[in-house]
């Protein structure tokens, strides 16, 4: 599952010419978010038997580089409606690609983008797998937890 997640990130980000370097996945408990820009997507399979959360946490340098790659020549502010929408959409695209790779006949909730300072949130009390990506001068963490 973690390999499929990493492939989904690389596939989608690659369409924008972005090739972040990732670390090995780490197992943690519980599923916590801690960066200043987060996108959270809930996952439910068709029968409702499996549920989970996929979170994308970005620092500002990563988001700025990603927005520039997604929309070259357009100055998009991270906190703007367009900035939040664009980053939420790329998270949604990665999630869709992951579900396709896993043959997960399920659905996702609309992505929720959250911006703040010194944030910390508990998304799931079960274990989660986190992969850290580094690109340019920033980082992104993608974390998956399933019940």
Image: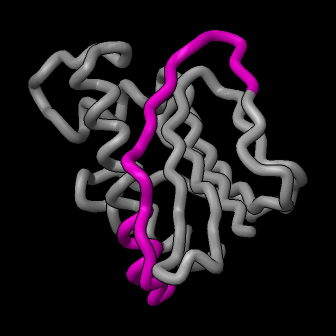
Can residue 10 be seen in the rendering of this structure? no
Which quadrant of the figure contains the C terminus?
bottom right
Q: Position of residue 54 (x, y in %)?
A: 58, 55
Question: Is residue 126 rendered to the left or right of residue 23?
Answer: right
Instruction: Identify the residue at horizontal 43%, vertical 61% (top origin).
Output: 108
The answer to whether residue 115 is above or below residue 102 is above
Q: Is residue 96 above or below residue 32?
A: below
Q: Position of residue 12 (x, y in %)?
A: 33, 62
Tell me the quarter of the picture where residue 95 sits: bottom left
Q: Which residues are magenta?
A: 95-120
The way the protein has been coloured in the rendering is one colour
Q: Horizontal placement of 19 versus 25: left or right?
A: left
Along the line of sight, the residue nearer the viewer: 56 or 48? 48
Q: Look at the image and tell me whether residue 66 can be seen.
A: yes
Instruction: Quadrant for residue 105, please give it.
Output: bottom left
Residue 71 image offset from top left, x and y in percent? 16, 34
In the displayed orientation, state which residue is furthest to the top: 117
Residue depicted at x 54% and y 33%: 38
Identify whether 129 is placed above or below 67: below
Q: Is residue 114 left or right of residue 75?
A: right
């Amino acid at each position: 599952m973690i390999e499929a997640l990493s492939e989904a990130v690389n596939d989608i980000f690659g369409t924008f010419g972005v090739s972040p370097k990732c670390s090995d996945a780490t197992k943690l408990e519980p599923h916590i978010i801690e960066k200043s820009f987060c996108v959270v997507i809930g996952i439910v399979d068709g029968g409702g038997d499996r549920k989970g959360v996929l979170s994308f946490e970005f620092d500002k340098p990563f988001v700025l580089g990603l927005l520039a790659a997604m929309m070259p020549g357009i100055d998009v502010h991270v906190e703007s409606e367009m900035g939040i929408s664009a980053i939420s959409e790329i998270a949604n695209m990665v999630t869709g690609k992951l579900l396709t790779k896993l043959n997960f006949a399920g659905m996702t909730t609309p992505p929720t983008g959250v911006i703040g300072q010194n944030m910390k949130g508990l998304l799931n009390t079960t274990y989660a797998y986190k992969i850290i990506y580094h690109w340019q001068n920033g980082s992104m963490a993608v974390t998956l937890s399933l019940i």
